[in-house]
């Protein structure tokens, strides 16, 4: 790690970042698909013109009919600080900036919180430690929902995020980019691809990114750097080898978390939004979040013949972080006077390892096409979040004062928490007459975890589970299809947040069930989209209002309707819409009347987005103008439903212009503004904390190939 640490530091100091084109296409792909391809080569991402398929044998896991949203590299936010900046228009995706996650990813999908160690994927299979967003070297970011969320063993039942690496191109390629925001962020970088060998069988793609990241909070932010290498080697027509490696670092100042006020007579009174200035730093320049890590994935595929192939993968990911976290609580909502509590975790470590081996067979007989997969994979997650002394001081949320640096901190108490899961799986997908698609499969999962506690005895958890899955898709016409899916799995439940008595305890996994039915349209009279009804249940995790312990209490049941729609009435105009309506999002906890039957916190009944892109090709070739609005309905602030956050909508605008420099190279300029109306709103409330929306922010970028 010493060499890695040196390289990551050098990246921050010396290299700028590759900035992808800012949604130059102005739309997102909303076509429903199966699980993302994993393994040797990342399959091309689905486009709106592609038909949904039942299963991809290369995925290496149980196939299934489910929902997939693809955000292309060209549609990424021009100056993103996390993945949500690029995913905010995907139905069902929410951010939890209440937990100071501006410089990292803190996402919810369909009401379920994504986890750092298991809810993100690299190239479809491996789950790296995902502490900060690394989109600069990614070709696509994919949101996999429904049964897709349960295809990989232990993960989130609501959905997962898969990041697809940029791979070496057939021709030589070089690009440079710069971007900035009105908050003071400045990034830039390089993207270089080459092929070697007499037949171009060896490919290399290098990305370097770095600069200064910043948010709307004055004096927050800091440095961020990334370097990555993607290598492809095809020594023969049977054998393919793929290697992905990325190393990164980030050193930023974080805002203090704003805790929810305590309930009085069963009612929580929120602080005054008019008097709360979100741009003021309420912690201090000492509130550091310094992260350094690396991800490595090696995949080998060999074609055995007669339709058989093998896939062997191995992955390693580690992240080391120093955090000084602050939370303001026990404040008077009238005067703003309260207490800021600071906790230091100076040596947090996370290590994920991954191994997979599988056999695949593709065959055809009479009117039946068959895809069969069986294999085994193992995931190991080692976490150590040491506990240390907490310091308190006075702070006012309306009239903040300078808070002295806390410390010196007392001796550390290491809290290692290690989990392993081993899964044996198979799936068989059959297509009849190219129209009716059926799939079935199962995974046998062995799980064991050792959870050290900050106080008291360690706990050991062992689980064994058969996880069946089934799916069907029927093409009514070449443009219209019905689908259904069902799956059971074991899902992780998260870790205790800052402010909880048992912070940062990792909770054990519990069973979850997923069901979904829907209708998909592909290019019917210029319309592409889907509508689906989902019903899933998972363990209910809550921050107890009395004991302040983060714990599992009953289960959560989510029922909802999700839609996506893309219309292009004329060549110059594209309309994209997405929406999520929760028919029900309820807690089932018969032993706790304070939450039983109550609605889930931070889950609006209705949320959605609308994007309109106009391309005046007959006036200015290469220009795309996009306007969008995001809406979120009323949200409850805690499991007891003791207060609500009002509904809000946010308007975003963007312009992108692409021009050719010569017959080969081109340049793309983007300019955008988020929250164009400068609305002020509480954005979310989760796990005992309250988040505030970002004010108006201008963003710009330029990318050129050479």
Image: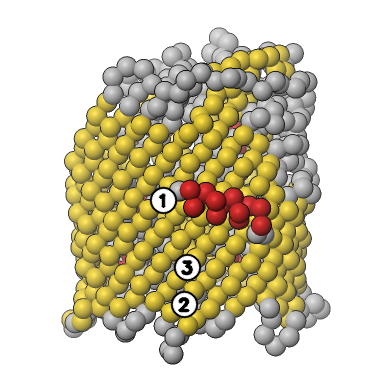
The one nearer the camera, 65 or 327, is: 327
Q: Which residue is mark 1?
A: 317
Q: CA distance from mark 1 to mark 2?
A: 23 Å
Mark with earlier residue (1, 3): 3
Q: Residue at x 60, y 19 (%)?
A: 407
Residue furthest out toward the top: 265
Is residue 194 shown above or below 428? below
Is residue 512 shown above or below 482? above
Looking at the rendering, which quadrant does residue 104 occupy?
Answer: top right
Please provide percent x and percent y for residue 159.
42, 49
The one nearer the camera, 305 or 247, is: 247
Q: What is the secondary structure assignment of the residue under circle 3? A: strand
Q: Tell me, for residue 692, which label it has, or none.
A: none
Q: Residue at x 74, y 36 (%)?
A: 219
Looking at the rendering, which quadrant does residue 275 occupy?
Answer: top right
Residues packed near mark 1 inside 10 Å, few (<14), some (14 to 19) or many (20 plus):
many
Q: Residue at x 48, y 41 (%)?
A: 320
Q: Which residue is mark 3?
A: 230
Please provide percent x and percent y for residue 120.
44, 50
């Amino acid at each position: 790690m010493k060499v890695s640490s040196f390289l990551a530091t050098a990246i921050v100091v010396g290299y700028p970042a590759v900035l992808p084109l800012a949604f130059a296409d102005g739309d997102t792909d909303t076509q429903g698909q199966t699980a993302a391809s994993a393994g040797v080569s990342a399959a091309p991402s689905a486009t709106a013109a592609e038909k949904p398929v039942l299963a991809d044998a290369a995925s290496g896991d149980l196939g299934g009919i489910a929902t997939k949203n693809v955000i292309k590299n060209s549609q990424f936010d021009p100056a993103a600080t996390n993945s949500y900046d690029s995913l905010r228009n995907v139905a069902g995706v929410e951010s939890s900036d209440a937990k100071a996650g501006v410089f990292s990813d803190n996402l919810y999908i369909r009401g379920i919180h994504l986890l750092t160690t298991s809810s993100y994927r690299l190239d479809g299979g491996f789950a790296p430690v995902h502490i900060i967003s690394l989109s600069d070297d990614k070709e696509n970011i994919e949101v996999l929902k429904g049964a897709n969320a349960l295809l990989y063993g232990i993960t989130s039942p609501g959905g997962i995020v898969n990041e697809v690496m940029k791979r070496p191109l057939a021709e030589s390629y070089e690009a440079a980019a710069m971007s900035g925001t009105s908050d003071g962020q400045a990034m830039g970088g390089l993207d270089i691809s080459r092929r070697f060998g007499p037949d171009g069988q060896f490919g290399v793609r290098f990305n370097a990114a770095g600069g200064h990241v910043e948010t709307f909070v004055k004096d927050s932010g800091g440095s961020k750097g990334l370097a990555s290498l993607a290598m492809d080697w095809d020594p023969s027509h049977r054998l393919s080898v793929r290697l992905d490696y990325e190393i990164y670092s980030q050193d930023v100042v974080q805002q203090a978390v704003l805790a929810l006020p305590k309930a009085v007579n069963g009612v929580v009174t929120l602080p005054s939004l008019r008097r709360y200035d979100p741009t003021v730093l309420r912690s201090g320049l000492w509130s550091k979040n310094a992260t350094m890590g690396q991800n490595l994935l090696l995949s080998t595929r060999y074609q055995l013949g007669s339709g058989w192939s093998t896939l062997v993968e191995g992955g390693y990911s580690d992240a080391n972080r120093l955090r000084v976290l602050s939370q303001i609580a026990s404040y008077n909502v009238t005067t703003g006077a309260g207490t800021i509590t600071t906790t230091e975790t100076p040596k947090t470590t996370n290590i994920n390892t991954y191994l997979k081996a599988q056999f695949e067979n593709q065959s055809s007989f009479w009117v039946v096409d068959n895809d069969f997969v069986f294999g085994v994979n193992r995931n190991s997650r080692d976490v150590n979040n040491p506990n240390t002394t907490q310091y308190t001081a006075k702070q006012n949320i309306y009239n903040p004062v300078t808070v002295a640096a806390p410390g010196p901190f007392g001796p550390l108490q290491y809290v290692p928490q290690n989990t392993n899961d081993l899964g044996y799986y198979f799936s068989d997908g059959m297509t009849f007459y190219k129209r009716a698609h059926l799939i079935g499969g199962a995974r046998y999962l062995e799980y064991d975890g050792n959870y050290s506690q900050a106080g008291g005895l360690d706990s050991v958890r062992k689980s064994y589970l058969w996880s069946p899955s089934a799916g069907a898709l029927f093409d009514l016409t070449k443009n219209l299809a019905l689908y259904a899916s069902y799956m059971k799995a074991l899902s992780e439940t998260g870790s205790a947040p800052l402010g909880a008595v048992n912070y940062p305890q990792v909770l054990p996994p519990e069973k979850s069930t997923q069901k979904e039915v829907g209708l998909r349209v592909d290019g019917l009279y210029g319309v592409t989209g889907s509508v689906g009804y989902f019903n899933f249940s998972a363990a209910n995790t809550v921050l107890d209002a009395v004991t302040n312990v983060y714990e599992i209490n009953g289960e959560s049941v989510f029922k909802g309707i999700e839609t996506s729609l893309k219309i292009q009435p004329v060549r110059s105009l594209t309309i994209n819409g997405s929406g999520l309506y929760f028919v029900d999002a309820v807690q089932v906890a018969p032993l706790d009347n304070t939450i039983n039957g109550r609605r889930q916190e931070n889950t609006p009944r209705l949320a959605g987005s609308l994007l309109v892109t106009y391309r005046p090709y007959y006036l200015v070739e290469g220009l795309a103008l996009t306007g969008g609005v995001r809406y979120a309905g009323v949200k409850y602030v805690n499991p007891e439903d003791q207060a609500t956050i009002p509904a809000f909508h946010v308007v975003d605008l963007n312009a992108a212009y692409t021009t050719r420099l010569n017959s080969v190279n081109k340049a793309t300029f983007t300019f955008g503004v988020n929250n164009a109306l400068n609305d002020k709103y509480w954005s979310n409330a989760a796990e005992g904390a309250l988040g505030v929306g970002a004010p108006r922010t201008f963003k710009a970028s330029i990318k050129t190939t050479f």
